[in-house]
Amino acid sequence: MKVIRSTAQLQKTMAQLRARRKSIGFVPTMGAFHEGHLSLVRKARRENGVVVVSLFVNPLQFGPHEDFKRYPRNFARDRRLLSGTKVDYLFIPNLRSFYLAGFQTFVEVTELSRGLCGKFRSGHFRGVATVVTKLFNVVRPHRAYFGAKDYQQVVLIRRMAKDLNFDIGIKILPTVRDQAGLALSSRNAYLSDQNRARALAIPYALAWIKKEVRTGKRNLSALRSEVLRRLHQSLDRVDYVEMVEPESLTPVKRIHGPFVVAVAGWVGKTRLIDNAIIRP
Amino acid sequence: MKVIRSTAQLQKTMAQLRARRKSIGFVPTMGAFHEGHLSLVRKARRENGVVVVSLFVNPLQFGPHEDFKRYPRNFARDRRLLSGTKVDYLFIPNLRSFYLAGFQTFVEVTELSRGLCGKFRSGHFRGVATVVTKLFNVVRPHRAYFGAKDYQQVVLIRRMAKDLNFDIGIKILPTVRDQAGLALSSRNAYLSDQNRARALAIPYALAWIKKEVRTGKRNLSALRSEVLRRLHQSLDRVDYVEMVEPESLTPVKRIHGPFVVAVAGWVGKTRLIDNAIIRP
C-alpha cells in the first residue's frame, strides 16, 4: 500500500493507471475505520484492478458547532486495519493543497439536501457533494463505494454523479452492524458502554417497525409515533423519524411500495443516524 | 466531422479516444459562430489530436427575462463555417438527455460570480459553471478553449477547474474584433447597422482609457467618469464600467499593475460586453 499525500501526484498516478487499462475502485472515507469501511474496501478489491482509499476529514462538511476538531483520527490504527485488505493507494490529502487558497467552488444538490439531516446540518451536503466531486476528479475511478448507513448521502451522490455526467459506477453496500445491531459509525467511538446500550434503541425501533409492516400494519402515522416514543425513552434528543421514498426522499403519505425509515438522534453529545428499507 | 447528439455516445467515444492516447481539444459554444469561435477551433486543431466542438444553447445560464428563446440558432450556417476547420466531432446535446428529469445539481463559484455581470444576471454564472462541469465530464478534454471577451466567465472557469481538480488545461484566446473594433459576439446579429455603429462607443472608450493610462494618467475615478460619459452618449443603458484586478475581479482602487476595464451596456434590446487588459 502506497501512501500519497500530494493531490497532483495521485491524479498523475491515476491517469497512468487508466492509460494502462487498469480498472480503479475508490473508497472515500474520513478514516477511523470500522468493519463498514472494510466491507467497502473488500468489495472494491474484488471488482477492480486497483483500489484507492482516501482518508480525509473534510472540514467543508462540518458545521461551525459540529465535531470537526474532535472527530476521531488514528492514522496508525487505520493503516494497520487496511494492511490486511490489499489496498494499492491510500490518499491522505494535505488540507492546504486540497483546498487551495481562494477556494470558492461548491457543488449543491438542491432538493435532496433539504430534508432529513439537511434540516439539521446546514451546509453539510454541500460539503459532501463538493469534496466527492473533487475526489472523483482526482481519482477518476471506474467505481466508487459508499455505505448505506448514510442513506441521504448515497442517494445524493448517485444523483450528483448522474446530473454532472460522472462516468463512475456508484456502488452502495449494506450497513454493517455490531452483534447487538448498532450501525457501525466512526462516531460510535464517542460512546461510553452505557450510552452505546442506550443507542440500541435506534436499531431496535427500526427492527420493530419493519416487523409491524411485515405483519400488515399500514397506519404510518401511528407507526411513526410509536417509533418516536421508543426512541425518546432512550435517547437524549431525536432530530427526526421520517418515512421517505427511496429515490426522491420525499415523505411517504401512505404505503404503496418500498420506503425508507430514516432516523437521527442524540445520545449525550453524539449524533447517530440509521435507516431501514422497508419492503411491505 | 461527425455530429453526435447522444451524451452517452459522445462520452463513450471520448473514452475510447483517450484510451488510444489521443489528446482532446474542446471548444464549448452556444453556436451562432463567428470568427472568435473559429479562432478557438483553429487553436484547438493545432494543439490536439482530436477536436470536439459542442453547440448547446444552455437554458440554465439565461435568466427568465433574457434572450434564451431568440438567441440566434442557425445550424446549417454553423456547420458550414466549421467545415473548413477540420473539427472531428460536433456535439449537439439533446436537451432532455443532457438535463435529465429531476436534474438538481449545480456548481457555484461564489465570489467571482458576485460582481460585474453577476450583479445583473442572477444565476447566469451558476448556469455556466454547471454546464461547463457537465461538458468537461462528458468530453474529458486535455485542453478547453475560451474567448477573453467573456472575461468574468473565463476567470471563473479557470478558478472552477482549479478548485474542483479538473485535469484540463484552460486556454484563453484574445477577443476577436471586426474591422471597426467591435468585439465579435453572437448577439451582434441582433444589431441594425445603426445600432452597430452606436455599439462602437464601447471599444472606442476602452481604446481611449488604454491610451490615457499609457500616457501617464492615473486618476481612476476621473478616467471611469469619462468612459461612462462617452458610453452614455451612444448607448441606451450602461450596466457597469469597472476597473478590476485581473484574477480576483475585485475593484482596483489605485493603479499598481495590470488591471482590467470591464464594460456592459445596452443598444436597444441588445446587451453587449467588452473588456480591455491595461498594462500601465
Image (cartoon, coloured by chain):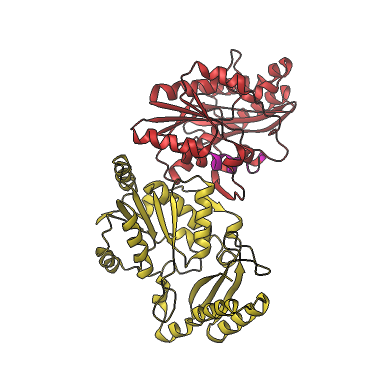
Chain colours: A red, B yellow
Please report the residue visible at 43 percent of the width from the left and 22 percent of the height from the top. A45
Q: In this rendering, does residue B100 appear at all?
A: no
Q: Nearer the viewer, residue A108 or B259?
A: B259
Q: State the image coordinates of residue B260 (x, y, percent, origin top left).
A: 57, 68
Please report the residue visible at 51 percent of the width from the left and 34 percent of the height from the top. A154
Q: State the image coordinates of residue B6 (x, y, percent, origin top left).
A: 31, 50
Direction from residue B72 to residue B259 in the image, left or right: right
Assess whether residue A122 is covered by the magenta stretch.
yes
Assess whether residue B204 is covered by the magenta stretch.
no
Q: Is residue A172 above or below residue B77?
A: above
Direction from residue A13 to residue B55 in the image, left or right: left
Q: Nearer the viewer, residue B218 or B148?
A: B218
Magenta region, mostly helix, strand or loop?
Answer: helix
Rendering quarter of residue A119: top right
Q: Which residues are magenta?
A: A120-132
Where is the C terminus of chain B found, in terms of image quarters?
Answer: bottom right
Q: Residue furthest top?
A: A179
Q: Is residue B261 above or below residue A116?
A: below
Please report the residue visible at 59 percent of the width from the left and 73 percent of the height from the top. B240
Rendering quarter of residue A99: top right
Q: Is residue A131 above or below residue A223?
A: below
Q: Nearer the viewer, residue A242 or B169?
A: B169
Q: In this rendering, does residue A113 appear at all?
A: yes
